Image (cartoon, rainbow, N blue to C red):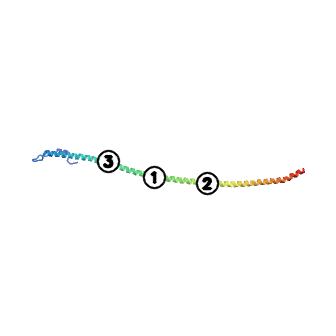
Amino acid sequence: MPKITPLEIQKQKFSRKWRGLDSIEVESFLAMAAEELEDLARAKSELDRQVRALEEENAGHRERERMLRDTLTTAQRASEDIRQAAQREAELIVREAQDSSERLTHHALQRSAEIEKAIHDLKIQRASFRLELQKMLELYAAVLEEDRREDERDKPLSYLTRKNE
């Protein structure tokens, strides 16, 4: 702010001296200077107000920039955390799938071994049954053969006994 105000310029009175200046001209000049000084003070006041408004706006922009930076940093951290969590979950799913696959494979191999053993046991049973059946057939054949021989032995007897009658 200027050291002298427009009001002080308007109220300023000068002493009179012989051969002094034209008082109307001095007062007119002082009024014009005061008016100019008042215009400059108003312009300065308006500029000061604009500067304060711009500084406040700038501070707001800086605060928003800081918040955006913080938000971006938080978002990046969250994104990284989510990515790491997804990676861990994927690894867990893969491990579980591998474990499940190994269990299924082991179960399938056990079941296959059980089936192969069952087939082997059935083959042994079939061979045993075939052997028993073959022995039975041989026994029946032997019994039939013996029965046929008895029939042949008995024929002559029955023929002989009929002649004797």
Identify the mark nearer the N-term, 2 or 1: 1
Relative side of 135 to 72, left or right? right
Left or right: where 21 falls relative to 116: left
User: Residue drawn 24% across and 46% down?
Assistant: 43
Q: Could you tell whether 66 is left or right of 161 in the image?
A: left
Q: For marks 3 and 2, give the CA distance.
A: 80 Å
Question: Which SS class for mark 1?
Answer: helix
- Count all numbered tags in the image, as a single digit: 3
Sequence order check, earlier mark of 1 and 3? 3
Report the amino acid beneath label 2. Ser
CA gap, disc 1 and disc 3:
38 Å
* Badge 2: residue crowd in 10 Å (few <14, some 14–19, many ≥20): few
Relative image position of residue 152 (x, y in whole percent): 83, 54
Q: Which mark is residue 67?
A: none
Asked if the residue at tag 2 contacts the one at tag 3, i.e. Cβ–Cβ closer than 8 Å, the answer is no
- Residue corresponding to mark 2: 112
Quarter location, residue 112 = bottom right
Amino acid type at circle 3 is: Glu
Give residue 159's position: percent from left, percent from top: 87, 52
Callout 3: SS: helix
**Residue 155 on image: x %, y %:** 85, 52
User: Which one is in front, 62 or 148?
Assistant: 148
Q: Residue at x 26, y 46 (%)?
A: 46
User: In front here: 152 or 129?
Assistant: 152
- Residue 84, percent from left and from top: 46, 53
> Does the image show residue 43?
yes
Which disc is residue 57 wearing? 3
**Residue type at mark 1?**
Arg
- Secondary structure of the residue carrying tag 2 is helix
Task: Kindly identify which numbered label has been placed on residue 83.
Answer: 1
Residue at horizontal 69 percent and vertical 54 percent from the top: 126
